[in-house]
Each structure stands twice: as structure tokens, then as C-alpha cells.
Amino acid sequence: MVATCRICLEPIYHFICAECLFRNIKLWLERNASYLLGEAEEAHQRLVETFSGMTGNTELCAVCKKVTEIVFCPYCYIREMYLHLREFDAVRAEQLVRILNFDFEGTGYFRDFEPNPTVLALEEKIEEGICDECGNEAEELFEFNGRFICETCLEYEDDRKLMKSKI
């Protein structure tokens, strides 16, 4: 069975795990922009934490040979890192993605993106409240596309994206 990227929902045929991709980012930053290492580590941790615990989509890394449930295609992982790092140094962030280029379809890392990239969309979480989607009270709400929604509705949004990609 082919793994699916948790962000873009595209199939991944030669999977490279987030840890191996981050190791390469870290190497480049150590040599070229060490002042961005803390920011890169923070972005990496947020990505990993955001998508930890999702079951049913495990994959073996082609580089380190470890199995992980945190499955992103290299393009999406690099894009998310770029979007975070460009806030601190756009020139270095652009240089980084030019070196670690997984944009095989030529869609571009540098075009304008929606204001809420995936990681940043899930960044803010509030305790207890009313879900903007279903109207039910929830113990945790997640900011998603400018709304605060419960975990059930967040999972529904992911399922809807998956169904659209199959059509």
C-alpha cells in the first residue's frame, strides 16, 4: 500500500521521514544561517506534534529505515519549513528550498500561499468553548481557516479533503 501525505493527501512512493529531512535542513542551517536553527527546530517540533498520534498511515523511511506515523511528502514538509523560516529571513529560507528542492511538478514554493498554512492553522488551540462548525461544546478547540472547531469537525475537514482528492 502506498503512503499518503498528511498535508496534501498525495501518494508518496519513496518516503523520506521528517527526521531525515530535518537533519538535512539542520546541516545546511549550521553552515549558512545558524541563527535560524532555533526557529527551524521549533517549526519541526510543531509539525511533528501536530501530526503525531494519527494512526492508519505508517511508512518506512527510505533513508533511516525507521517506521513512522508522521507521514509528509518532502514537498509539503519543506514548504511548511520555508513558510515558517521566511518570517525571520526570507532570503535564507528561499536559498534553503532551492537546495532541498522537492518541487518536481513545478508548482513553486515561492508563490503566495493562503494566510493559514497547515501548521500555522493548527497552531492556536483554546480550552473549552463552542465549536464554530457544529455548535457543540468542546473541551478543546483548534483554529482552522479562521474558525475555532472541535477535534471531530477537524477530522471531518480532513476526510472531506480526502474524498475530494479521490473524485
Image (tube, grey):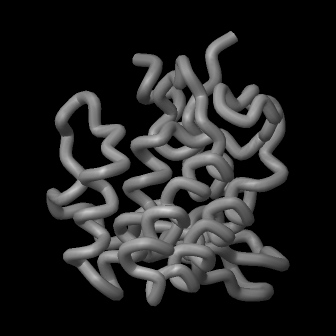
Q: How many marks?
A: 0
Q: Residue at x 55, y 36 (%)?
A: 5
Q: Residue at x 73, y 65 (%)?
A: 49
Q: Residue at x 81, y 35 (%)?
A: 66
The residue lying toward the viewer, choosing from 25 and 108, is: 25
Res. 90 image quadrant: bottom left
Tell me if residue 89 comes above or below residue 45 in the rendering. Answer: below
Instruction: Specify whether 52 is left or right of 39.
Output: right
Tell me if residue 158 comes above or below residue 119 in the rendering. Answer: above
The residue lying toward the viewer, choosing from 18 and 149, is: 18
Whether residue 44 can be seen here? yes
Q: Residue furthest front?
A: 31
Where's the C terminus, which quadrant? top left
x then y, percent, for residue 46: 64, 71
x then y, percent, for residue 123: 58, 77
x then y, percent, for residue 75: 40, 43
Instruction: Specify whether 34 is left or right of 114.
Output: right
Instruction: Specify whether 3 is left or right of 164.
Output: right
Res. 72 image quadrant: top right
Instruction: Specify whether 30 is left or right of 127.
Output: left
Tell me if residue 23 comes above or below residue 32 in the rendering. Answer: above
Q: Residue at x 60, y 66 (%)?
A: 44
The residue lying toward the viewer, choosing from 86 and 132, is: 86
x then y, percent, for residue 143: 56, 75
Q: Residue furthest top?
A: 1
